Image (cartoon, rainbow, N blue to C red):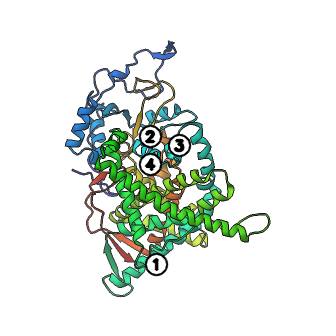
Amino acid sequence: MSTRVTAGIKAKGSCGSRNVFFGVAPQKGLCVTAAGTVMHGKLEDGKRVVKGMRSFEEIPHTGRNGWLNLLKFWRENRFQQLHKHMERTFNTLGPIYREKLGTLSSVNIMLPSDVSELFKSEGLHPQRMTLQPWATHREIRNHSKGIFLKNGEEWRADRLQLNKEVMMSAAVKRFLPLLDEVAKDFFQMLQTRMEKEGRGEKGKCVLTIDPSPDLFRFALEASCHVLYGERIGLFSSSPSLESQKFIWAVERMLTTTPPLLYLPPRLLLRMGAPLWTQHATAWDHIFSHAEARIQRGYQRLSNSLDRASPAGTAGSQYTGVLGQLMEKGQLSLDLIKANITELMAGGVDTTAVPLQFALFELGRNPEVQESVRQQVRVSWAQAGGDPHKALQGAPLLKGTIKEVLRLYPVGITVQRYPVRDIVLQNYHIPAGTLVQACIYPMGRSEKVFEDPLRFDPSRWSREEGQRVEAAGFRSLAFGFGARQCVGRRIAESEMQLFLMHILLSFHLSVPSSEDLNTTVTLILQPETPPRITFSKL
């Protein structure tokens, strides 16, 4: 049974006020002190030994045989419900457990205090789990790897260059007008569609649709505009088949990734396994799509430099992230291609799907919707058309995105390999262990959030004025620190501007306020996209 997430109704939790963990009594001897607070430590053979500390082997687990566990996952279709599996396992075993699936072993945690301790030990070059199917594809196709697949000093050097164009505040101010332009055009497209297909009198039309195809087109159009500095015309009455194929390829890549994580990709390659073939073909199409646009961007930049002043500048017009990287010349063309391709592949579903959830939650929580709208109206009026000022004046927009991603995180875990031995829940975790912060269970836990099943964007504004334990580790949808999502600022801005223009012009409602069933490919998404009713204000 799914859990209701509403503004006005608090769903019944599974644990009461007794000293229990998530509805079950703690295991005998399980220490529940926050990570990093264990006292009386001493060193033996270079490792910290803590009085009462329990060994790694004593961590509760889901079964010691990784291959049997993997077979059970496939047989019971648990990959698609991995987020629910994690939630149930925490309810049963407590706030930390070990899991082995095929060749992959991990320690899973979900309390912010433990996550805080994990990130303190990530080191100068943080490492997360390598998506080996992606890495294998790059190797067999002789493609350079972008920062998503790199580690160490090589990762850090490339990341610092990319940060200047996609993460710094100056970069955000440069690309915000491009995202705002696409968001306004989406609004115009929706209004035109409402006039043609809507029901009711002119000026009072309503339109009920599944907006997911349009949201994917919006996300791709916005990504192309920011990354390549060009529009690709996806809001026309007949968008190109090429762009639709790109969206299909991204979806196929995401769907085929999880099963390949637990098996040796090169073995599947030698066997000619259909799953690997589908995955590699999807990536080939993604690279082909990106290559064509990068070549056009390179040609535009060359032409503009030929026409420029003797100083060699291409002028003051913003040429997108691709143009900025090419102009500055700090990364080789191969590395620029690798990173732009990864940004494109990761920038469509990861914004289009959260926007589905956002429209749904705002639609079934009209009071929340109206409070956000009122703040947006005031901010927009005072901003004088400046999108940066408009977003700054509407913190509830940012809170809406954070709240959506708390309940429906795009990626359901954030991973790190600690560079030193650490202690979590009084268990010894050796350096180099894969530790996963499971953010779907965290976002819905009464141990972490008050009234966690209530959709309440204002909770984030309230928290800023309060001292909340490990507050910085309660919102991890984009990761944390130096290795957080490199496309974070683009995604946050894109989603906020989209919602701003929608709320300024339309009232949202839903034909059904029943909970959405969700499934996991590589990202969390609804099993069936919600239908949304748009009414002209």
Earlier residue among tags 1 and 2: 2
Residues at marks 3 and 2 touching, judged by CB atoms closer than 8 Å? no
Labelled disc at residue 130: 2
Vertical relation: 81 (above or below) 309: above
Could you say where residue 95 lies in the image, as x and y percent from the top left?
A: 35, 33
**Element type at marker 1?**
helix
Task: For mark 4, give the secondary structure.
Answer: loop
Q: Amino acid at mark 4?
A: Ala
Between residue 95 and residue 126, name the one nearer to us: 126
Q: Which residue is mark 3?
A: 483
Residue 175 location in percent, x, y?
59, 63
Q: Amino acid at mark 2?
A: Thr
With respect to residue 425, does 265 lie above or below? below
Identity of the residue drawn at 36% across and 45% down: 440
Contact (CB < 8 A) between labels 3 and 4? no
Q: Which mark is residue 477?
A: 4
In the image: residue 39, left or right of residue 310: left
Secondary structure under the numbered disc 3 in the rendered image: helix
User: How much space separates mark 4 and mark 1, taking CA atoms?
Assistant: 30 Å
- Crowding at mark 4 (Cα within 10 Å: few <14, some 14-19, many 20+): many
Label of residue 188 in the image: 1
Question: Whole-percent x and y of residue 105?
Answer: 35, 32
Give the spatial CA distance, label 3 vs label 2. 13 Å
Residue at x 40% of width, y 18% of height: 53
Give the Cα distance between marks 4 and 2: 18 Å
**Is residue 266 among the parts visible in the rendering?**
yes
* Residue 221 percent across, percent down from the top left: 48, 68
What residue type is disc 1 on? Gln
Q: Whole-Å distance between the Cαs marked 1 and 3?
A: 37 Å
